[in-house]
Image (cartoon, rainbow, N blue to C red):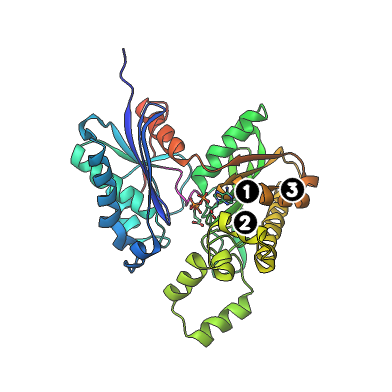
Amino acid sequence: MKQEHRLLVINPGSTSTKIAVYEGESPLIEKKLEHSPEELNKFQDIIDQYDFRKDSILNFLDEQGMNFNKLDAVVARGGLLKPISGGTFKVNDLMVEHLRQGYQGEHASNLGGIIAKEISNQLDIPAYIVDPVVVDELQDIARISGFEPIERKSIFHALNHKAVARKAAAQLGKKYEEANLVVVHLGGGISVGAHNCGDVIDVNNALDGEGPFSPERSGGLPNGDLVRYIDEHNLTWKELKRQLVGNGGLVSYLDTNDGKKVQEMIQSGDEKAEKVYEAMIYQIAKEIGSCAVVLKGELDAIVLTGGLAHDEYLVSRMKEYIKFLGEILVFPGEDEMQSLAEGGLRVLRNEETPKDYS
Ligand SMILES: Nc1ncnc2c1ncn2[C@@H]1O[C@H](COP(=O)(O)OP(=O)(O)OP(=O)(O)O)[C@@H](O)[C@H]1O
Ligand SMILES: CCCC(=O)O
């Protein structure tokens, strides 16, 4: 009988590192290693977490009695590289260099490709990344910001967007390449993308202050007031990022990034929590409306996904705003580990040629 390919899958997120071992499409081991703020705050920059994250992964796999020699590849979630098209990329030295330097900035997923490459080098097997956060399929007009020195960028939860969009299209009896969808990833960050026949032609840069606020991100802010705030507080770029990206949004107003906690606050009559949560839903709904306009109203469905899509209160409040736009499909949570494994398998099975990062 033909042996299925075995893959190690690594997905470093802002507060956790998800690990899995797949045999074909089936997970043999799955683990989410949670990292407390106390653990992570010890590190100045995300890249400084490299040894800590790698050791956490290797220690866990050792505890599981993992036989590394049976692996065929390591697949990881990739980070803030140069803008690239979607698909599976082989991790090469240039990619590792760009992930280390944070070519387009800092993000936990920068660590994915670097750790994957190191483990794969030791085992003499390939390392891949799939649909990294810099997948760029923007239509040209969407690149224009309104101020010439600054161009809009595509930075979003591409892996989950693409995976869920394919599922939604299948549910609608269409190929992804034939469907028009507005996909809404509701995680620690929130990205809302207009998917036009297989390409994400416009999306808010979820990491860099575009679009709605989210559990951890401020989203777009009034420019003038932001500049005054930086000036008054004498902030460096790094200090500002720390406030707006990790400590913006719900964290800034309610001191938590946890949607379930916010729900508890609302249920116990906390009026501020209710108002702020409603404002987040309102901003997301506005962004969905923008994407519906980008698609000129010709959309097959709006697709809600990510952790917050588990929250029935949020989903029903959201529907009040957007139901006039058409069908709404909900895929709570994310399927990133499975999507990473599938991206690696397509290459190992010679169904797809891995792309070269150059
Ligand atoms: N049942 C639920 N009710 C309300 N909120 C929930 C529920 N389950 C998860 N969440 C919230 O979803 C958010 C996290 O979503 P998710 O796990 O998709 O994000 P992440 O992976 O941490 O970050 P990102 O997706 O931005 O990379 C948190 O605010 C979490 O509390
Ligand atoms: C995936 C990039 C956007 C974010 O982390 O919010």
For the point 29% across and 63% down, the residue is: 48
Residue 321 lies left or right of residue 217; in this view the side is: right
- Where does label 3 land, which residue? 319
Tell me if residue 81 can be seen: no
**Closer to the camera: disc 2 or disc 1?**
2
Q: Which residue, as the protein is rendered here, is positioned at the far bottom?
A: 232
Amino acid carrying mark 2 in the image: Gln
Which circle's residue, 3 or 1, is located before the other in the chain? 1
- Given the current orientation, which residue lies at the most extreme front position? 268
| Mark 1 close to ligand 1, CB under 8 Å | yes
Determine which quarter of the picture holds residue 270: bottom right
Residue beneath disc 1: 311
In this rendering, position of residue 79 left or right of residue 64: right
Badge 3 or badge 2: first in the primary sequence:
2
Q: Which residues are magenta?
A: 130-135
Kindly indicate whether the residue at mark 1 contacts the one at mark 2 (C-beta within 8 angstroms): yes
Q: Is residue 284 magenta?
A: no
Front-most of residues 87 and 254: 254
Helix, strand or loop status at disc 1: loop
The label number, if any, that marks residue 263 in the structure image? 2
Q: Quadrant of the N terminus?
A: top left
For the residue marked with disc 1, what is the amino acid? Asp
Looking at mark 2, is its residue's CB closer than 8 Å to ligand 1?
yes
Mark 3 vs mark 1, foreground winner is 1
Location of residue 350 in the rendering, given as x and y in whole percent from the top left corner: 38, 26
